[in-house]
Amino acid sequence: MSDILVKAIDVSKHFGPFKALDEVSLDVRRGEVCCIIGPSGSGKSTFLRCINLLERIDSGSIWIEGELLGYRRDGNSLHEISDREIARQRRRTGMVFQRFNLFPHMTALQNIIEGPVQVLGEPVKEARERGRDLLARVGLSDKMESYPSELSGGQQQRVAIARAMGMRPDIILFDEPTSALDPELVSEVLDVMKDLAETGMTMIVVTHELGFARNVADTVAFMETGRIEEVGPAAKVLTQPDSLRASEFIKAVQ
Ligand code: ADP
Ligand code: MG
């Protein structure tokens, strides 16, 4: 289990009577990029939100580095953990959403240092230095003092990625990070994500960008109706999937 960073076992999640996740199991190794593909409504966002503890699961379990999310073991029984513990566990995962979710009243640099200073308790000077480095890594050294409204969608999304990295997460979850962008801005964000993958960051990426999945992902999981229909090496799943539905989906998307 040592090189498994995230382990989901038989995770189910209902919204009322509707089963959004149906016994989803997935292993993500340290340093791996796992792309999740599949039609709208198949449960991709819900699964990421469960890993990020934005949703509670009904059954099954999710582990990060061997730590069970949301529960504490006490002999043979499990107890829900406190909100404070939930917040601590949530910090293991960074999340980048479709919409950039930057704080509109803060500059790019302020957006990045807010969490490290307020939540991690980093000294401001150190956080600023690291924030500058992170902005340089996403190619935005010249935009440190810009407000989100002064940045393009692609630039805002790159700030959002730098902000996620600023919290030193074990893994970053991306939920369709380029699907709200104008087409000409997609590649600058994917390039930043590729660079990040090359530094060894563990990533789960929900995306319809199959070119990115082909070039960057180690594994690809195809989801449909709340289930992982197929998961395996990216090259295999994207070019010779066993599942007919995966094959049809891939043909339709590209
Ligand atoms: P995807 O990201 O693959 O498009 P989602 O995880 O967003 O799919 O949604 C899966 C299904 O769960 C959809 O049918 C959606 O309508 C439903 N769903 C998601 N969140 C909620 C919610 N908070 N309340 C009720 N239904 C939800
Ligand atoms: Mg979604």
Image (cartoon, grey):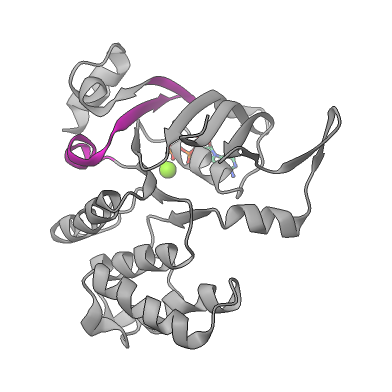
> Looking at the picture, how far across and down is residue 81, in whole percent?
78, 48
Q: Can residue 182 be seen in this view?
A: yes
Q: Vertical placement of 241 versus 95: above or below? A: above
Name the residue at the front extreme. Answer: 2
Q: Is residue 105 visible?
A: no
**Res 11 quadrant in image:** top right
| Span colored in magenta | 208-230
Residue at (45% x, 82% y) in the render: 126
Q: Vertical placement of 102 versus 4: above or below? A: below
Residue at (41% x, 68% y) in the render: 163
Task: For ligand 2, give the image quadrant.
Answer: top left
Is residue 199 one of those drawn in magenta? Answer: no
Q: In which quarter of the image is the C terminus?
A: top left
> Looking at the picture, how far across and down is residue 16, in whole percent?
68, 33
Please state if 36 lies on the left or on the right of 53 as rendered.
Answer: left
Closest to the observer: 28 or 250?
A: 28
> Looking at the picture, how far across and down is residue 113, in whole percent?
46, 78
Please state if 173 lies on the left or on the right of 253 as rendered.
Answer: right
Q: How many marks?
A: 0
**Res 10 quadrant in image:** top right
Is residue 217 one of those drawn in magenta? Answer: yes
Residue at (27% x, 67% y) in the render: 153
Q: Vertical placement of 93 versus 210: above or below? A: below
> Looking at the picture, how far across and down is residue 179, in whole percent?
29, 51
Closest to the observer: 250 or 236?
A: 236
